[in-house]
Amino acid sequence: MEFSAQQIAELLGGTLEGNADEKVNNVSKIEEGKPKTLSFLANPKYNHFLYETEASIVIINNDFNLEKKVKPTLIRVNNAYEAFAKLLQLYAEIKGTKKGIEQPSHISQSSTIGNDCYVGAFAYIGENVKIGNNVKIYPHVYIGDNCAISDNTTLFSGVKIYHDCVIGKDCTIHANTVIGSDGFGFAPNTSGETFAKVPQIGNVVIEDNVEIGSNASIDRATMGSTILRKGVKLDNLVQIAHNAEIGENTVIAGLSGVAGSTKVGKNCMIAAQVGVAGHLKIADGVKIAGQSGIGANIDKEGEIVQGSPAFNVGEYRRSYVLFRSLPKLNDRINELSKKLK
Protein backbone atom coordinates (compact mmCIF):
# COMPACT_ATOMS: atom_id res chain seq x y z
CA MET A 1 0.00 0.00 0.00
CA GLU A 2 1.40 3.37 -1.03
CA PHE A 3 0.94 6.78 0.56
CA SER A 4 1.95 10.15 -0.82
CA ALA A 5 3.73 12.88 1.11
CA GLN A 6 0.60 15.01 0.72
CA GLN A 7 -1.59 12.32 2.32
CA ILE A 8 0.82 11.84 5.22
CA ALA A 9 1.14 15.57 5.83
CA GLU A 10 -2.64 15.98 5.91
CA LEU A 11 -3.01 13.06 8.28
CA LEU A 12 -0.43 14.52 10.68
CA GLY A 13 -1.37 18.16 10.22
CA GLY A 14 2.21 18.84 9.10
CA THR A 15 3.88 21.23 6.70
CA LEU A 16 5.35 19.90 3.45
CA GLU A 17 8.76 20.80 2.04
CA GLY A 18 9.56 19.13 -1.26
CA ASN A 19 7.65 16.88 -3.63
CA ALA A 20 4.04 16.46 -2.45
CA ASP A 21 3.58 13.51 -4.82
CA GLU A 22 6.51 11.52 -3.41
CA LYS A 23 5.24 8.06 -2.46
CA VAL A 24 6.32 5.51 0.15
CA ASN A 25 5.30 1.92 0.82
CA ASN A 26 7.39 1.09 3.88
CA VAL A 27 9.23 2.62 6.85
CA SER A 28 12.90 2.68 7.81
CA LYS A 29 15.38 4.05 10.34
CA ILE A 30 16.92 7.28 9.11
CA GLU A 31 20.42 5.79 9.21
CA GLU A 32 19.20 2.83 7.12
CA GLY A 33 16.87 4.78 4.83
CA LYS A 34 15.97 3.32 1.46
CA PRO A 35 14.01 4.73 -1.49
CA LYS A 36 10.22 4.47 -1.14
CA THR A 37 10.43 4.46 2.67
CA LEU A 38 9.28 6.89 5.35
CA SER A 39 11.55 7.83 8.25
CA PHE A 40 11.74 10.41 11.04
CA LEU A 41 14.33 12.48 12.89
CA ALA A 42 13.83 13.32 16.57
CA ASN A 43 17.20 12.71 18.26
CA PRO A 44 19.80 15.46 17.60
CA LYS A 45 22.68 12.97 17.53
CA TYR A 46 21.21 11.58 14.30
CA ASN A 47 20.95 14.97 12.58
CA HIS A 48 23.76 14.25 10.13
CA PHE A 49 21.87 11.26 8.72
CA LEU A 50 19.23 13.62 7.31
CA TYR A 51 21.78 14.80 4.72
CA GLU A 52 22.81 11.22 3.84
CA THR A 53 19.63 9.16 4.00
CA GLU A 54 18.03 7.55 0.96
CA ALA A 55 14.57 7.62 2.56
CA SER A 56 12.02 9.32 0.32
CA ILE A 57 10.12 11.15 3.07
CA VAL A 58 11.37 12.22 6.52
CA ILE A 59 9.31 13.65 9.37
CA ILE A 60 11.17 16.35 11.34
CA ASN A 61 10.37 18.83 14.10
CA ASN A 62 9.11 22.31 13.21
CA ASP A 63 12.11 23.95 14.89
CA PHE A 64 14.74 21.94 12.99
CA ASN A 65 17.11 24.26 11.07
CA LEU A 66 18.55 22.86 7.86
CA GLU A 67 22.28 23.37 7.36
CA LYS A 68 22.18 22.44 3.66
CA LYS A 69 19.92 20.95 1.02
CA VAL A 70 18.44 17.51 1.60
CA LYS A 71 17.29 14.84 -0.83
CA PRO A 72 14.07 13.57 0.84
CA THR A 73 10.74 15.36 1.01
CA LEU A 74 10.27 16.76 4.52
CA ILE A 75 7.16 16.92 6.69
CA ARG A 76 7.46 19.31 9.63
CA VAL A 77 5.40 18.62 12.76
CA ASN A 78 5.43 19.68 16.41
CA ASN A 79 6.82 16.34 17.61
CA ALA A 80 8.40 14.04 15.03
CA TYR A 81 8.58 11.03 17.34
CA GLU A 82 4.90 11.21 18.32
CA ALA A 83 3.86 11.76 14.69
CA PHE A 84 5.84 8.74 13.50
CA ALA A 85 4.40 6.62 16.32
CA LYS A 86 0.91 7.65 15.23
CA LEU A 87 1.64 6.51 11.68
CA LEU A 88 3.03 3.19 12.89
CA GLN A 89 -0.11 2.64 14.92
CA LEU A 90 -2.30 3.28 11.88
CA TYR A 91 -0.09 0.98 9.79
CA ALA A 92 -0.43 -1.77 12.40
CA GLU A 93 -4.21 -1.36 12.42
CA ILE A 94 -4.34 -1.68 8.65
CA LYS A 95 -2.23 -4.86 8.75
CA GLY A 96 -4.39 -6.29 11.54
CA THR A 97 -7.75 -6.05 9.77
CA LYS A 98 -8.34 -9.80 9.69
CA LYS A 99 -11.95 -10.97 9.86
CA GLY A 100 -13.82 -14.24 9.79
CA ILE A 101 -13.55 -17.65 11.42
CA GLU A 102 -10.95 -20.06 10.14
CA GLN A 103 -11.26 -23.80 10.30
CA PRO A 104 -10.52 -25.97 12.10
CA SER A 105 -11.43 -24.03 15.25
CA HIS A 106 -13.82 -24.71 18.13
CA ILE A 107 -16.41 -22.22 19.38
CA SER A 108 -18.89 -23.51 21.96
CA GLN A 109 -22.52 -22.98 21.07
CA SER A 110 -23.15 -21.19 24.37
CA SER A 111 -20.55 -18.53 23.56
CA THR A 112 -21.26 -15.25 21.76
CA ILE A 113 -18.99 -13.41 19.34
CA GLY A 114 -19.45 -9.77 18.26
CA ASN A 115 -19.17 -8.18 14.85
CA ASP A 116 -16.03 -8.03 12.67
CA CYS A 117 -14.10 -10.54 14.77
CA TYR A 118 -11.32 -12.85 13.65
CA VAL A 119 -10.83 -16.38 15.00
CA GLY A 120 -7.74 -18.16 13.70
CA ALA A 121 -7.31 -21.84 12.98
CA PHE A 122 -7.01 -24.21 15.96
CA ALA A 123 -8.35 -21.61 18.38
CA TYR A 124 -10.56 -22.94 21.20
CA ILE A 125 -13.36 -20.91 22.80
CA GLY A 126 -15.06 -22.56 25.76
CA GLU A 127 -18.55 -22.42 27.22
CA ASN A 128 -20.38 -19.16 27.98
CA VAL A 129 -17.59 -16.95 26.65
CA LYS A 130 -18.59 -13.40 25.69
CA ILE A 131 -16.46 -11.76 23.00
CA GLY A 132 -17.04 -8.17 21.90
CA ASN A 133 -16.72 -6.49 18.52
CA ASN A 134 -13.55 -6.38 16.42
CA VAL A 135 -11.71 -8.85 18.63
CA LYS A 136 -8.75 -10.63 16.99
CA ILE A 137 -8.05 -14.18 18.19
CA TYR A 138 -5.03 -15.63 16.42
CA PRO A 139 -4.36 -19.34 15.83
CA HIS A 140 -3.81 -21.67 18.79
CA VAL A 141 -5.41 -19.34 21.33
CA TYR A 142 -7.26 -21.01 24.22
CA ILE A 143 -10.11 -19.19 26.01
CA GLY A 144 -11.61 -21.05 28.96
CA ASP A 145 -15.22 -21.17 30.12
CA ASN A 146 -17.06 -18.04 31.31
CA CYS A 147 -14.45 -15.55 30.13
CA ALA A 148 -15.34 -12.08 28.84
CA ILE A 149 -13.26 -10.20 26.26
CA SER A 150 -14.30 -6.67 25.28
CA ASP A 151 -14.12 -4.74 22.00
CA ASN A 152 -10.96 -4.22 19.94
CA THR A 153 -8.78 -6.58 21.96
CA THR A 154 -6.13 -8.71 20.23
CA LEU A 155 -4.88 -12.10 21.46
CA PHE A 156 -1.85 -13.29 19.54
CA SER A 157 -0.96 -16.89 18.80
CA GLY A 158 -0.62 -19.24 21.74
CA VAL A 159 -2.25 -17.02 24.38
CA LYS A 160 -3.99 -19.06 27.07
CA ILE A 161 -6.80 -17.56 29.14
CA TYR A 162 -8.12 -19.76 31.91
CA HIS A 163 -11.77 -19.85 33.00
CA ASP A 164 -13.67 -16.88 34.47
CA CYS A 165 -11.14 -14.21 33.51
CA VAL A 166 -12.16 -10.75 32.27
CA ILE A 167 -10.29 -8.67 29.68
CA GLY A 168 -11.27 -5.09 28.85
CA LYS A 169 -11.35 -3.02 25.67
CA ASP A 170 -8.38 -2.17 23.43
CA CYS A 171 -6.03 -4.66 25.06
CA THR A 172 -3.16 -6.49 23.36
CA ILE A 173 -1.77 -9.76 24.70
CA HIS A 174 1.25 -11.15 22.90
CA ALA A 175 2.17 -14.72 22.04
CA ASN A 176 2.27 -17.49 24.63
CA THR A 177 1.23 -15.37 27.59
CA VAL A 178 -0.89 -17.16 30.20
CA ILE A 179 -3.72 -15.39 32.00
CA GLY A 180 -5.35 -17.02 35.01
CA SER A 181 -3.06 -19.94 35.78
CA ASP A 182 -3.15 -21.01 39.42
CA GLY A 183 -1.50 -18.79 41.98
CA PHE A 184 1.43 -20.32 43.86
CA GLY A 185 -0.59 -21.40 46.89
CA PHE A 186 0.65 -24.31 48.97
CA ALA A 187 0.35 -25.01 52.70
CA PRO A 188 2.62 -27.38 54.67
CA ASN A 189 0.82 -30.31 56.25
CA THR A 190 0.96 -30.98 59.98
CA SER A 191 4.17 -32.98 59.65
CA GLY A 192 5.80 -30.25 57.60
CA GLU A 193 7.12 -32.82 55.15
CA THR A 194 4.82 -32.14 52.21
CA PHE A 195 2.74 -29.26 50.86
CA ALA A 196 -0.98 -29.32 50.17
CA LYS A 197 -2.29 -27.27 47.27
CA VAL A 198 -4.61 -24.40 48.20
CA PRO A 199 -7.35 -24.19 45.52
CA GLN A 200 -7.17 -20.95 43.56
CA ILE A 201 -10.82 -20.08 42.95
CA GLY A 202 -10.52 -16.39 42.01
CA ASN A 203 -9.83 -14.89 38.60
CA VAL A 204 -7.85 -12.25 36.71
CA VAL A 205 -9.36 -8.90 35.73
CA ILE A 206 -7.59 -6.85 33.07
CA GLU A 207 -9.01 -3.38 32.50
CA ASP A 208 -9.00 -1.32 29.28
CA ASN A 209 -5.97 -0.37 27.18
CA VAL A 210 -3.58 -2.87 28.76
CA GLU A 211 -0.70 -4.42 26.78
CA ILE A 212 1.12 -7.55 27.91
CA GLY A 213 4.26 -8.86 26.21
CA SER A 214 5.01 -12.43 25.23
CA ASN A 215 5.56 -15.29 27.68
CA ALA A 216 4.19 -13.40 30.66
CA SER A 217 2.15 -15.01 33.44
CA ILE A 218 -0.70 -13.40 35.35
CA ASP A 219 -1.87 -15.76 38.10
CA ARG A 220 -5.48 -16.03 39.20
CA ALA A 221 -6.37 -15.01 42.75
CA THR A 222 -6.85 -17.45 45.58
CA MET A 223 -10.11 -15.60 46.21
CA GLY A 224 -11.25 -12.39 44.56
CA SER A 225 -9.20 -11.05 41.64
CA THR A 226 -5.69 -10.37 40.45
CA ILE A 227 -6.10 -6.96 38.79
CA LEU A 228 -4.27 -5.01 36.09
CA ARG A 229 -5.77 -1.51 36.04
CA LYS A 230 -6.32 0.45 32.84
CA GLY A 231 -3.30 1.52 30.85
CA VAL A 232 -0.87 -0.98 32.43
CA LYS A 233 2.00 -2.09 30.17
CA LEU A 234 3.92 -5.29 30.90
CA ASP A 235 7.04 -6.39 29.04
CA ASN A 236 7.93 -9.95 28.02
CA LEU A 237 8.54 -12.53 30.74
CA VAL A 238 6.84 -10.63 33.55
CA GLN A 239 5.23 -12.52 36.44
CA ILE A 240 2.28 -11.10 38.39
CA ALA A 241 1.30 -13.37 41.28
CA HIS A 242 -2.08 -14.14 42.81
CA ASN A 243 -4.14 -11.30 44.30
CA ALA A 244 -1.61 -8.66 43.20
CA GLU A 245 -2.92 -5.36 41.88
CA ILE A 246 -1.05 -3.16 39.40
CA GLY A 247 -2.23 0.47 39.32
CA GLU A 248 -3.26 2.57 36.34
CA ASN A 249 -0.63 3.36 33.70
CA THR A 250 2.14 1.52 35.53
CA VAL A 251 4.83 -0.02 33.31
CA ILE A 252 6.95 -3.07 34.21
CA ALA A 253 9.97 -4.15 32.15
CA GLY A 254 11.04 -7.70 31.32
CA LEU A 255 12.04 -10.42 33.78
CA SER A 256 10.40 -8.62 36.71
CA GLY A 257 8.09 -10.28 39.21
CA VAL A 258 5.49 -9.03 41.67
CA ALA A 259 4.65 -11.48 44.46
CA GLY A 260 1.24 -12.27 45.87
CA SER A 261 -1.13 -9.67 47.34
CA THR A 262 1.20 -6.75 46.62
CA LYS A 263 -0.47 -3.50 45.56
CA VAL A 264 1.51 -1.36 43.12
CA GLY A 265 0.28 2.21 42.70
CA LYS A 266 -0.52 4.10 39.53
CA ASN A 267 2.03 5.70 37.17
CA CYS A 268 4.90 3.61 38.55
CA MET A 269 7.90 2.57 36.47
CA ILE A 270 9.58 -0.74 37.29
CA ALA A 271 12.73 -1.54 35.33
CA ALA A 272 13.99 -4.97 34.26
CA GLN A 273 14.81 -7.84 36.63
CA VAL A 274 13.10 -6.28 39.64
CA GLY A 275 11.71 -8.54 42.35
CA VAL A 276 8.91 -7.29 44.59
CA ALA A 277 8.08 -9.34 47.69
CA GLY A 278 4.54 -10.21 48.70
CA HIS A 279 1.94 -8.29 50.73
CA LEU A 280 3.58 -4.91 50.13
CA LYS A 281 2.28 -1.50 49.05
CA ILE A 282 4.09 0.63 46.48
CA ALA A 283 3.00 4.29 46.36
CA ASP A 284 1.94 6.12 43.20
CA GLY A 285 4.63 7.35 40.83
CA VAL A 286 7.45 5.26 42.32
CA LYS A 287 10.40 4.40 40.03
CA ILE A 288 12.43 1.25 40.71
CA ALA A 289 15.82 0.78 39.04
CA GLY A 290 16.77 -2.46 37.31
CA GLN A 291 17.75 -5.54 39.34
CA SER A 292 16.40 -4.02 42.54
CA GLY A 293 14.84 -6.09 45.30
CA ILE A 294 11.84 -4.64 47.11
CA GLY A 295 11.30 -6.17 50.55
CA ALA A 296 9.38 -3.38 52.32
CA ASN A 297 6.61 -0.89 51.58
CA ILE A 298 7.47 2.25 49.61
CA ASP A 299 5.18 4.89 51.10
CA LYS A 300 6.56 8.07 49.54
CA GLU A 301 4.92 9.00 46.24
CA GLY A 302 7.32 9.56 43.37
CA GLU A 303 10.34 8.12 45.17
CA ILE A 304 13.15 6.57 43.11
CA VAL A 305 14.82 3.51 44.63
CA GLN A 306 17.66 1.19 43.69
CA GLY A 307 19.55 -1.76 45.13
CA SER A 308 18.76 -5.03 46.85
CA PRO A 309 17.33 -4.37 49.34
CA ALA A 310 16.31 -1.15 47.60
CA PHE A 311 16.54 2.32 49.13
CA ASN A 312 16.56 5.93 47.91
CA VAL A 313 18.54 6.24 44.70
CA GLY A 314 20.60 9.23 45.91
CA GLU A 315 21.71 7.39 49.02
CA TYR A 316 22.35 4.29 46.93
CA ARG A 317 24.71 6.16 44.60
CA ARG A 318 26.65 7.68 47.48
CA SER A 319 26.88 4.24 49.09
CA TYR A 320 28.04 2.73 45.82
CA VAL A 321 30.92 5.19 45.60
CA LEU A 322 32.02 4.07 49.07
CA PHE A 323 31.52 0.43 48.19
CA ARG A 324 33.77 0.71 45.14
CA SER A 325 36.43 2.34 47.33
CA LEU A 326 36.46 -0.47 49.91
CA PRO A 327 39.45 -2.35 48.38
CA LYS A 328 41.59 0.82 48.49
CA LEU A 329 40.39 1.57 52.00
CA ASN A 330 41.27 -1.96 53.06
CA ASP A 331 44.78 -1.57 51.59
CA ARG A 332 45.25 1.66 53.54
CA ILE A 333 44.11 0.01 56.77
CA ASN A 334 46.51 -2.88 56.23
CA GLU A 335 49.35 -0.44 55.50
CA LEU A 336 48.60 1.58 58.65
CA SER A 337 48.41 -1.62 60.71
CA LYS A 338 51.89 -2.63 59.51
CA LYS A 339 53.28 0.80 60.39
CA LEU A 340 51.72 0.69 63.86
CA LYS A 341 53.27 -2.71 64.49
Image (cartoon, rainbow, N blue to C red):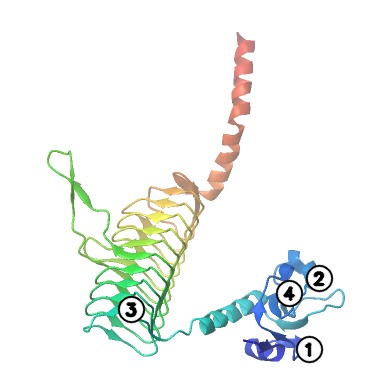
Identified at 36% across, 90% down, the residue is 115
Point out the residue furthest to the right here: 68
Q: Are marks 2 and 4 in contact (CB under 8 Å)?
A: no
Residue 198, x across and y down, in percent: 18, 54
Q: Are marks 1 and 2 in contact (CB under 8 Å)?
A: no
Q: In what quadrant of the picture does the C terminus appear?
A: top right
Residue carrying label 2: 52
Q: How far apart are the alpha carbons under marks 2 and 4?
A: 11 Å
Residue carrying label 1: 19
Quadrant of residue 220 within the rendered picture: bottom left
Q: Residues within 10 Å of mark 1 (few under 14, many from 20)?
A: some
User: Helix or strand or loop: what does disc 4 sit on?
Assistant: loop
Give the mark nearer the N terminus: 4 vs 1.
Answer: 1
Identified at 60% across, 35% down, the residue is 324
Residue 79 seen from this side: no
Residue 261, x across and y down, in percent: 30, 58
In this rendering, position of residue 285 left or right of residue 189: right
Residue carrying label 4: 34
Q: How far apart are the alpha carbons under marks 4 and 1?
A: 17 Å
Give the mark nearer the N terminus: 3 vs 2.
Answer: 2
Q: Residues within 10 Å of mark 4 (few under 14, many from 20)?
A: some
Q: Amino acid at mark 4?
A: Lys
Give the mark nearer the N terminus: 2 vs 4.
Answer: 4
Residue carrying label 3: 104
Of residue 281 and residue 156, the one placed in the foreground of this image is 156
User: Helix or strand or loop: what does disc 1 sit on?
Assistant: loop
Q: How far apart are the alpha carbons under marks 1 and 2?
A: 18 Å
Q: Are marks 4 and 1 in contact (CB under 8 Å)?
A: no
Give the mark nearer the N terminus: 4 vs 3.
Answer: 4
| 105 is higher (above) or lower (below) than 22 | above
